[in-house]
Amino acid sequence: MAKGHRTAAAAHEALKRAHAAGRIIFFTDPHLLARPGSPVYNGLDVFVPPLVLMVSSLTLLFAFGLLEWIVALVLVLLYQVYGAPHLVHWRMHRRVVAAVLHSPHNWQLLWDLGGLAVALKDWPERNCVAPAGDWQKFSADYLEENEQTAASGD
């Protein structure tokens, strides 16, 4: 078990170095990760923006009048339908990347949950998709070998 743990830690370190060097990219699925029960879910991303927008539109109702309020409400609804999902996904993606690079435990937890994939930036066909893919083998095949080759070439 210690060897498996060391292998996971070495694979995770290789992933961190490759991400820092810009050699890999992460893909996330918002349908699996941006929901209650996910470790990276943040309810404030979902509930605070509409609340703030609705309160500000009500302020417009009292300050200016009904026509301005209706216009503001339409704009708020358009934002909620078209803009907010992209913003929530972007913020969730940033949290996922920060979490998976923080520790091997976080990586394994999110990998087992699914909704995460890692790919080589220059060769996206070489990817590994959670939870079915073997991320340690991906790291050993594409990341650790390249680091060893680059180190021996110097």
Image (cartoon, rainbow, N blue to C red):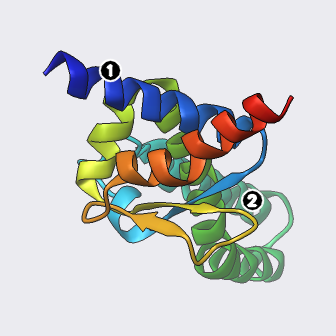
Image quarter of residue 145: top right
Q: Residue at x 32, y 20 (%)?
A: 6
Q: Nearer the viewer, mark 1 or mark 2?
A: 1
Residue 66 position within the rendered picture, expressed as x and y whole percent measured from the top left:
75, 78
Quarter holding the C terminus? top right
Above-or-below relation of 65 to 88: below
- Residue type for callout 2: Phe
Residue 53 position within the rendered picture, expressed as x and y whole percent measured from the top left:
67, 58
Q: Nearer the viewer, residue 70 or 8?
A: 8
Count the marks.
Answer: 2
The secondary structure type at the circle numbered 1 is helix
Above-or-below relation of 122 to 90: below
Image quarter of residue 62: bottom right
Above-or-below relation of 112 to 88: above
* Label 2: few (<14), some (14–19) or many (≥20) C-alpha neighbours in 10 Å: few
Residue 6 numbered mark, or none: 1
Viewed as shown, does residue 97 lie left or right of 9? right
Q: Which residue is mark 2?
A: 62
Quarter holding the N terminus? top left
* Label 1: few (<14), some (14–19) or many (≥20) C-alpha neighbours in 10 Å: few
Identify the mark nearer the N-term, 1 or 2. 1
Viewed as shown, does residue 109 lie left or right of 52? left
Residue 87 position within the rendered picture, expressed as x and y whole percent measured from the top left:
66, 61
Residue 92 visible, this angle? yes
